[in-house]
């Protein structure tokens, strides 16, 4: 694309063009869209409810998937064996064929707590199994294994994505409001107000975050419901995560408040709030988006750390951090490594947000290197 062609593009078009050239950021964006779609439609995507227990399949290993022209996609059920001397439980694949099908009836659910349904994306083909084994109960399928209560790890991870991902988005809203308002006032007003807000930011940034999160989370009453704890943890993460955005906003406001269009707006009688929020802040929207994108992983990791330590979200609420509580026992992890499944989702999510933030940061300066 020639320089003349670039000159005919708007700022948003230039940003989009530069962003498309960052392949890793584009791939991360698609990955995040898939993860958030999974979180939004977790009920039909999961085979089982996160609280469904299969007491005869405690710590069952992942079921291997097979494919054949005769049976299509199928698996073989795990049969439990107990050592008569050590009483240690082990599982072996049975010769029984359990065919799987898509959009098959399964456990009833209510999508978003409103729409009833029974169809699941993947599940056991009940009709085929009943035809071959009319007297046997339908065996459960654990694609990523089961935990100590016999709950499907994959179903829990899918349901837990809704909580863990929504914590980042809801916390992002609080961070956005506090960072924009306090950072904008600090840069626009200046003087004692600026000094007061900056000293507050420095105090918050000087405090070690994890011990502070633990101390504040420990204050929450133990008799609170899971929903109240969820919103309290989200608010807590917002109150401690706005300082970086506020610094970015303050620096941009200091650079733009003496521009001709801002001075002209004040001379025409525009109020200070109008000049700040309608004239100055839209000028660096892309930088705000970058700062917010890079702050989401910190909130998700904060919720995960608190829930992992038993100070954040609590059962029966399911999140990736709550699931990792079972990994506190090193023996359980060594014998049942599939319990670490939520950790891989967390790492993938954090990397995707970081790569997306890097791509947006490069695209925020579209005149620097676009060819």
Image (spheres, rainbow, N blue to C red):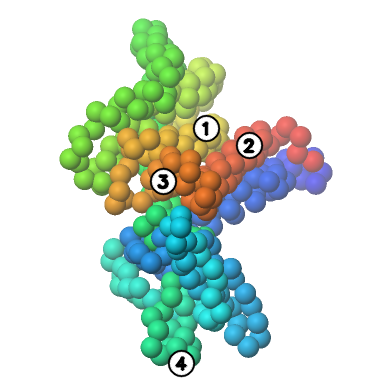
Q: Given the current orientation, which residue lies at the most extreme right position?
A: 2
Alpha carbon distance from label 4 to label 1: 57 Å
Q: First in sequence: mark 1 or mark 2?
A: 1
The picture places residue 290, in percent across and down from the top left corner, at 55, 35
Give the numbered dot on residue 131: 4
Q: CA distance from mark 3 to mark 1?
A: 34 Å
The answer to which image quadrant residue 137 occupies is bottom left
Q: Nearer the viewer, mark 3 or mark 2?
A: 3
> Residue 237 sits in which quadrant?
top left
In the depicted view, which residue is nearer to us: 359 or 136? 136
In the displayed structure, 180 sits above or below 36; it is above
Work out which quarter of the rendered image holds the C terminus and state it: top right
Q: Which of marks 4 and 3 precedes in the sequence?
A: 4
Image quarter of residue 276: top left
Q: Residue at x 42, y 24 (%)?
A: 209
Of marks 3 and 1, the one in the foreground: 3
Measured from the top left, where is residue 360 in percent x and y? 61, 39
Alpha carbon distance from label 3 to label 4: 38 Å
Q: Which label sits on residue 291?
A: 1
Q: Is residue 253 visible?
A: no
Q: What is the total number of numbered labels drawn onto the structure image?
A: 4
Please report whichever mark, 4 or 1, sits nearer to the chain's N-terminal start.
Answer: 4
Mark 3 vs 2, N-terminal side: 3
**Nearest the camera: 93 or 9?**
93
Q: How far apart in space, not on screen, are marks 3 and 2 (Cα)?
A: 34 Å
Which residue matches tag 3? Answer: 326
Marks 1/2: CA distance?
Answer: 10 Å
Determine which residue is flagged by label 2: 358
């Amino acid at each position: 694309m020639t320089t003349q062609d670039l000159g005919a593009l708007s700022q948003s078009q230039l940003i989009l063009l530069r962003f498309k050239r960052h392949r890793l950021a584009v791939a991360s964006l698609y990955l995040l869209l898939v993860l958030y779609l999974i979180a939004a439609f977790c009920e039909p995507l999961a085979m089982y409810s996160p609280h469904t227990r299969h007491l005869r399949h405690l710590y069952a290993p992942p079921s291997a998937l097979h494919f054949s022209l005769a049976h299509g996609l199928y698996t073989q059920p795990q049969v439990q064996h107990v050592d008569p001397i050590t009483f240690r439980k082990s599982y072996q694949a049975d010769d029984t064929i359990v065919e799987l099908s898509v959009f098959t009836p399964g456990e009833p659910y209510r999508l978003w707590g409103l729409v009833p349904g029974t169809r699941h994306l993947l599940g056991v083909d009940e009709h085929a199994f009943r035809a071959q084994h009319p007297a046997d109960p339908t065996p459960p399928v654990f694609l990523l294994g089961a935990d100590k209560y016999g709950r499907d790890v994959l179903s829990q991870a899918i349901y837990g994505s809704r909580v863990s991902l929504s914590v980042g988005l809801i916390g992002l809203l609080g961070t956005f409001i506090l960072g924009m308002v306090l950072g904008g006032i600090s840069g626009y007003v200046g003087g004692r107000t600026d000094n007061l807000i900056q000293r507050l930011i420095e105090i918050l940034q000087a405090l070690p975050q994890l011990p502070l999160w633990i101390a504040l989370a420990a204050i929450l009453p133990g008799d609170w419901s899971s929903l109240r704890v969820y919103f309290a943890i989200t608010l807590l993460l917002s109150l401690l995560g706005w300082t970086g955005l506020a610094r970015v906003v303050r620096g941009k406001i200091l650079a733009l408040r003496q521009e001709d269009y801002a001075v002209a707006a004040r001379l025409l009688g525009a109020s200070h709030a109008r000049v700040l929020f309608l004239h100055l802040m839209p000028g660096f929207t892309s930088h705000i988006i970058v700062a917010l994108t890079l702050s989401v992983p910190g909130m998700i990791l904060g919720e995960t750390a608190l829930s992992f330590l038993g100070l954040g979200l609590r059962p029966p609420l399911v999140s990736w951090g709550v699931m990792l509580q079972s990994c506190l026992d090193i023996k359980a992890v060594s014998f049942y490594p599939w319990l670490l499944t939520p950790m891989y989702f967390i790492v993938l999510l954090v990397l995707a947000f970081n790569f997306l933030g890097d791509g947006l940061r490069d695209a925020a300066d579209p005149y620097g290197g676009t060819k």
